[in-house]
Amino acid sequence: MTNPGETSAWQLLSRPGVRQVPSERLELFDCPGFLQPDLCAQLIGLIDKDRRPSTIADPNGDDYFRTSETCDLDAAEPAVQELEALLEEFNGIDPAHGEPVQGQRYDVGQEFKAHTDYFQPDGADYERYCAIPGQRTWTCMIYLNDVESGGATRFKVINKMFQPQTGKLVCWNNRRPDGRVNPNTLHHGMKVRKGVKYVITKWYRENHWG
């Protein structure tokens, strides 16, 4: 049985259409058509309304490491509430363990270079971000639109790429079976070559959020 801040392959694969990437290095899944286009369009509108330049924890001196724009979505918005309900039904994770939903917008030339979603245990900001809620456990990411060219997400260690497609969900376990963080989750939000990419990201924690 999983902890309330985690899900399992069994839980995720019980939904029709979910596929697991065959790899012993990480738990990685996708589900085309997870969100309907109308809900995707509503979420895009919310991102465009409140977007700001993206930032990273533990800055590494590369001002071009993450060049997208970000938006923390209001939990009171009906579209966000619908999204949260769909995610809870899908992964079974106690909503109290979830961070607020975040949206990202990538214009032509923008990217998020190869990174992991967990916080480095020896990083300068680890205590700041993890002292109460604990480490990130799972990531659920959803593409909100098709992209004319570029914008794929590449998991570099296993050389697996996901192309943006309206409503497609990609999710992964940020940790190994023994609870240690998993560097094999290294992934690159590749540059958009033509068009604009919109993405929703939902992270979950070991403990209650907030």
Image: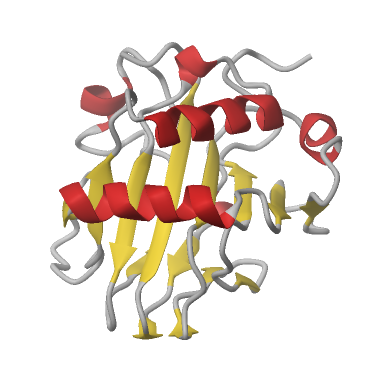
Q: Residue at x 32, y 12 (%)?
A: 132
Q: Nearer the viewer, residue 129 or 96?
A: 96
Image quarter where the N terminus lies is top right
Colour scheme shown: secondary structure
Q: Can residue 159 be seen in this view?
A: yes
Q: Which of 174 and 14 is in front in this view?
A: 14
- Image position, residue 199 (x, y; %): 42, 57
Q: Residue furthest front?
A: 38
- Image position, residue 36 (x, y; %): 60, 51
103 lies above or below 138: below
- Image position, residue 50 (x, y; %): 17, 47
- Left or right: 182, with 192 as reference point: right
88 lies above or below 37: above
19 lies above or below 86: below
149 lies above or below 198: below
Image quarter where the C terminus lies is top left
Q: Can residue 55 be seen in this view?
A: no
Q: Nearer the viewer, residue 68 or 27?
A: 68
- Image position, residue 200 (x, y; %): 43, 49
How many marks the image carries: the answer is 0
Q: Residue at x 54, y 70 (%)?
A: 164
Q: In which quarter of the image is residue 48?
A: bottom left
- Left or right: 40, with 33 as reference point: left
Q: Quadrant of residue 168?
A: bottom right
Q: Nearer the viewer, residue 177 or 210?
A: 210
Q: Residue at x 43, y 11 (%)?
A: 208
